[in-house]
Structures are given as C-alpha cells and as structure tokens.
Amino acid sequence: MRSNDIPLVRELDLFADMAEANFDELMQAAFLQRFPPQVQLITEGDPADFLYIVVEGGVELFAAHGGRETSIEIVRPVSTFILAAVLRDAAYLMSGRTVESCHILMVPAENVRTIFARDHVFARAVVRELSGRYRSVVKSLKNHKLRNAVERLANCLLRVHDEQGGNGTATLQVDKRTLAALLGMTPENLSRAFATLKPYGVEVNGREISLTRIDDLRNLAKPTPLIDDPAT
Amino acid sequence: MRSNDIPLVRELDLFADMAEANFDELMQAAFLQRFPPQVQLITEGDPADFLYIVVEGGVELFAAHGGRETSIEIVRPVSTFILAAVLRDAAYLMSGRTVESCHILMVPAENVRTIFARDHVFARAVVRELSGRYRSVVKSLKNHKLRNAVERLANCLLRVHDEQGGNGTATLQVDKRTLAALLGMTPENLSRAFATLKPYGVEVNGREISLTRIDDLRNLAKPTPLIDDPAT
DNA sequence: CGACGATTTGAATAGGATCAATGGGAGTGG
DNA sequence: CCACTCCCATTGATCCTATTCAAATCGTCG
C-alpha cells in the first residue's frame, strides 16, 4: 500500500486502537485500490480471500440464484464488507460491485485472521464493526419488507435531503437506474414512484430534487430510527 | 439459575472455553426459563437488557411498522439472539416470540458487556457467534428474495426431511399457521403452495408429510449451500 | 351433538415486474 | 450550427405473484 494512504487507514475505527506492530503487519500485506463504477469485486461462493473496506464510493452487495438477482445492501464509507466470511474462513454469501468510483482497501483474509487471534484490541473493534454490519442488514431487510416502493423512495429522499443540509433540495449521487436497484425496484417502477410523490411536493429534474412539502412527505414516509438511523 | 442446568450451558460454544471465574459471574446473574408457545419475549425499540439464548424450542424474530409485520428469522437451538444490540448497548431492532415451548437462557446485558471487555476468549467466541448470526440473516434474506413461495416451501420440506432421517417422510414441528409465518407467506398461500407441490410427490396429512418423488422435488427446489446450509 | 378454531378453497384486489413503445438530452460527426 | 445516434428515462398495457376477503370444510374437544 502507498505509505501516504496509511494515516487515513490508521484512523478507521477498526484499526484506530490496535498495536502498532500488528497494524504494520496488516498494512504490509494490504493495498488500497481505485475501481471504476460497475466493477464486480467479489462473487458469491468464492472463498473469502480478502477483507474489503470501502474508503470512498459505494459498493452494492447482491446475490443471484436461479436466474434471479437481488440487491442486499449498499455499503458506504467507512465500512467493511464480507467481514463475517473472512473471520469464519468461509465462502462469500454475496457478490459485490462498485456503484461509483471507489477507493477500496483490500486486506488478505489470512492476515486478518492471524492478527485477530493475536490482538485483543483489534478483536473488539471487529466485534463493533460486525455488530454494526449485522444491524445494518436487519434494517435493510425491514426497509424492504415493511415498506412499499413509494415509501422506500420517500424515506430515501428525506435521508439524502437531510444529509445535504436540509434546505429543500437534494442531489442524487447515482443515476436513476442504480437508484432503482438500491431501492429494490425496477427503473420503470422508480419513475412511477416519483410520479406518485409529486402531490407530496417532490419535483424532479434529472438528478436535482426539490422537496416543497417536507411535512407531507415525512407524514407519508414515516421514518423511524429503527430502520433509517444508520448509527444506532 | 438452577445449578443442574449449568453444565449444559457451559458446553455451549459461546461459553465452552472462557475462564471459570467469568463464567460463574455470568451465570450468577443469568436464569434459564421455560416459556409456552406464542409468548413475546422482546419488543423492538426497547433497550437491550438481556442476551437471550435459545436452548430448546424456537423463537421467531419479527418486526412491525406502519400496521405491517414481517418475520425476519427463526432462531433454533443453540443460538443467541439480539447479541448485536447487547454488545452495542442499543435498542432491539426486532421483536421476538416463542413459536413452541422453549427453554431460554437469559443473561443480563450489562454482565455480558462486562465479561466481554475482560475475557478475550469469550470475546472471540462472541465474534464467532455474531458472524454466524450475520450469515444466517443474509441467507434468510436470500431465501425470501430469490425464491417464490412454492420454492421456499419445497426447500423447507427437503431440509426437514433430511434432518429427520431422509426416509421419504417428514413431520412438521409447528402448526401450518406458524409454518406459513416462518416461510413468509399467509396460511392461505401455504395451502396453495402445498397443492402446487402435489405433482412433485408431496402428500400432506395434517403434520405428516410424505415425499414420494424426492428427485423431482429437489429439481424444483434447487437447494444451494449458499442459502440452505446452516453451518457455513 | 355442538362449538370453536384451523385449514382449505374460491373470487377479487394490489403491488410490482415485464414487455413494448415513445420521448429527451448529451455527445458525435458532418 | 445542425442532424444523427445512443442511452436513459418515462409512459402505457399486460401479466404474475401473493394478499385480502369471504365462505366452506374438517377436526378436536367439551
């Protein structure tokens, strides 16, 4: 890995408190790499050979079976993915592809397991990360099973809007085709969902969204921290 | 906790290798309790005050929002549930209810966190359990999103059949209403799914199922270890 | 026997997906 | 600068799966 990237990585929660020697050993084997959008990084069923950490960009985890495909989760910085498979030395359960330009840190799985066995501080950080991933998947599952397409879009817009300052406008970070996949619907259905939200003050112009009736929209979306709060 | 239950608990993977003193401290505060079917043990949104371990029976984890309800996962012995919430000292994301008569071990969350911070061996066992729970939820999610109702039932029947000796018959452990919930469908739909499977050699008589054309059924179900293998 | 709950069956409905066709904007080449 | 092309987005029509509502049947337990 390039030495000027190391301080950035060192500050990640997962590595912040671990012993210097162990961190160095991990980083000696690791590398930080750029990927363009729509690159498939891992394939389900393959043995877990690297731990991946999304430093910048976004990665879609998805699974396929019998001709169908489903998006499981979108991983945003700074989070790991497939940590569980690495720790168990098992096969990936999901495939992963970039949705934007990404900086991804790749750490060989064997090094992760070795240091995990040796460094108690790192082991505890792993638990924190892993429990966070677990809760994230559960929230994603609730979002998909307890809300219909329109509600998922409404909550997504409110979240993006709040993240971007909450001044009544929002800019989508991805194209609508990708957004549809992330929300678990077809592009056609996303168009219809936007149309359905027009009476709730949602005006769309390409990637620019303006929300003129936030309260109405919030009333429809019914956001809840048990689904929408990324922290808890 | 009753002292004669302790050896049983001590053998659970989660506790098997930890220091004696720490185990004793955990068990001093814990208790093993029996519950009848259909008892709600935890409610989403509540603070995590106990770690639950299913020693016998089965617990359905589910979530509700805006008048809808969805089953997330069924937890079978011997597994924990809501371990992630306990470790993070956060609110439960799911509610849980027994689906059968259960033996449940309840360990106060604060004790779990205390011993987790102190006992490295326990911390590693926690990681193993947590990573297992994570992968279990992902498999459950794939099962629901990549298969339709008939396929889910077919795979369920094959799994039960194999567990019970694989001699062409199987006995359902729960009533059909509960089975429908576990498979993520309505009771009416379960009936129709059974009817659909009749041409594949599935004969139903109350809770007794006989499978006369296993190969055909397997061909329809298309089981895969990436969804159906509980171990990996 | 009678009542109640569980299961099955039937008909109607809803939510999304799929297929097909049309618009619309960005980039390209004349 | 303008026409052309391509890809994305939208719109319309239809299909499919599963849910909902309603009614009939079955089984068990008083």
Image: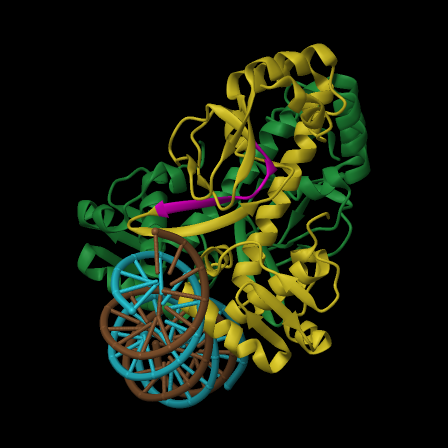
Chain colours: A green, B yellow, C cyan, D brown
Compare residues B127 and A76 and report the one nearer the observer: B127
Where residue A115 appears, as percent x and y from the top left, is 78, 27
Q: Quadrant of residue A65?
A: bottom right
In this rendering, position of residue D30 left or right of residue A119: left
Tell me which residue sits at (74%, 24%) in the image. A23
Tell me which residue sits at (74%, 17%) in the image. A20
Where residue A140 appears, as percent x and y from the top left, is 47, 48
Compare residues A219 and D25 and report the one nearer the observer: D25
Where residue A131 appears, as percent x and y from the top left, is 57, 33
* Image height of A199 relative to A23, above or below: below
Where residue A36 appears, as percent x and y from the top left, is 62, 54
Tell me which residue sits at (52%, 41%) in the image. B101
- Can you say which quadrant of the picture contains the C terminus of chain A? top left
The number of discs equals 0
In this rendering, position of residue C18 left or right of residue D14: right
* Residue A55 in view here: yes
Considering the whole magenta stretch, tell me its main secondary structure: strand
- Can you say which quadrant of the picture contains the N terminus of chain A? top right
The magenta stretch is B53-64
- Tell me, yes or no, whether the highlighted magenta stretch contains residue A177: no
* Image height of B146 relative to A135, above or below: below
* Image height of B26 relative to B32, above or below: above
* Image height of C23 relative to B225, above or below: below
Compare residues B78 and B1 and report the one nearer the observer: B1
* Residue A44 in view here: no
In this rendering, position of residue A124 left or right of residue B16: left
